[in-house]
Image (cartoon, rainbow, N blue to C red):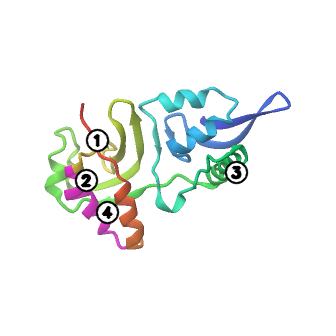
Amino acid sequence: MGNYHKVKVNNKLVIVCTLGTMENMYYIRRDEAYIVRAFDADPAIKLLLMDVSIIWRFRWPDEDIAIDYQNQNAFKESYQKIVDAVGKRNPRSLIFNILDSSFHNGFSNDHEANCIKQNRLKLLGDRYSAISGTRTIFSCLSCNKLYAFSQTEIELVIKPSILSLTEYPRDFLEKVVERIKPYHGV
């Protein structure tokens, strides 16, 4: 079961593209969902934008789409670019080793023993709430526990760990780490 962008054609709802699953929007960023919402015939997308448990697609630098708000035609063209891009996307993540093992060990006492040995995280996407704003969500590959990190944790551990990856171009990784949003406690 998934979430879909739907439009009305001849008084029938027609699926234009898949946005994600019931839990996570693997194919669309939250800012893109605002644009799609303007054309969507199903009110469910408005509810998704308010759901603080949803993980939205991370803002990968190679997927940026310029949104033109100048006039109705330019806005419709921007919408069409988003729909075309979302329709071609696959779920995407970034897996990396934490360079500082003591960092991961101190997070929680409920980790399984192999979490300490593996020290691998996956960048999943972004969550949003009106109270704490946007924060980037990661998961532990061993126990699947979700994390959002403080600015200090991102600067000292997450960024160097991601930048140590050699299978991606350095400039791409630098843009990725610039887009990681910290958790701001309330």
Kind of residue at badge 3 = Glu
First in sequence, mark 3 or 2: give its number.
Answer: 3
Q: Looking at the rendering, in which quadrant would you find the N terminus? A: top right
According to the image, label 1 marks what residue?
A: 183
Give the SS element for disc 3. helix
According to the image, label 4 marks what residue?
A: 162
The residue mark sitting in front, 2 or 4, is 2
Q: CA distance from mark 4 to mark 3?
A: 35 Å
According to the image, label 3 marks what residue?
A: 77
Give the SS element for disc 4. helix
- Chain part drawn in magenta: 152-166
According to the image, label 2 marks what residue?
A: 154
The secondary structure making up most of the magenta span is: helix
Q: Tell whether 175 sits left or right of 48.
A: left
Q: Is residue 140 magenta?
A: no
First in sequence, mark 2 or 1: give its number.
Answer: 2
The residue mark sitting in front, 1 or 4, is 1
Residue 73: percent from left, percent from top: 73, 47
Q: CA distance from mark 3 to mark 2?
A: 36 Å
Q: CA distance from mark 1 to mark 4?
A: 18 Å
First in sequence, mark 1 or 4: give its number.
Answer: 4
Task: Identify which residue is drawn at 56% across, 38% down.
Answer: 34
Task: Identify which residue is drawn at 57% across, 55% down.
Answer: 66
First in sequence, mark 4 or 3: give its number.
Answer: 3
The residue mark sitting in front, 3 or 2, is 3
Give the SS element for disc 1. loop
Kind of residue at badge 2 = Ile
Q: Is residue 88 above or below residue 165?
A: above
Q: Residues within 10 Å of mark 1 (few under 14, many from 20)?
A: many
Kind of residue at badge 4 = Ile
Q: CA distance from mark 1 to mark 3?
A: 34 Å
CB within 8 Å, label 2 to label 1: no
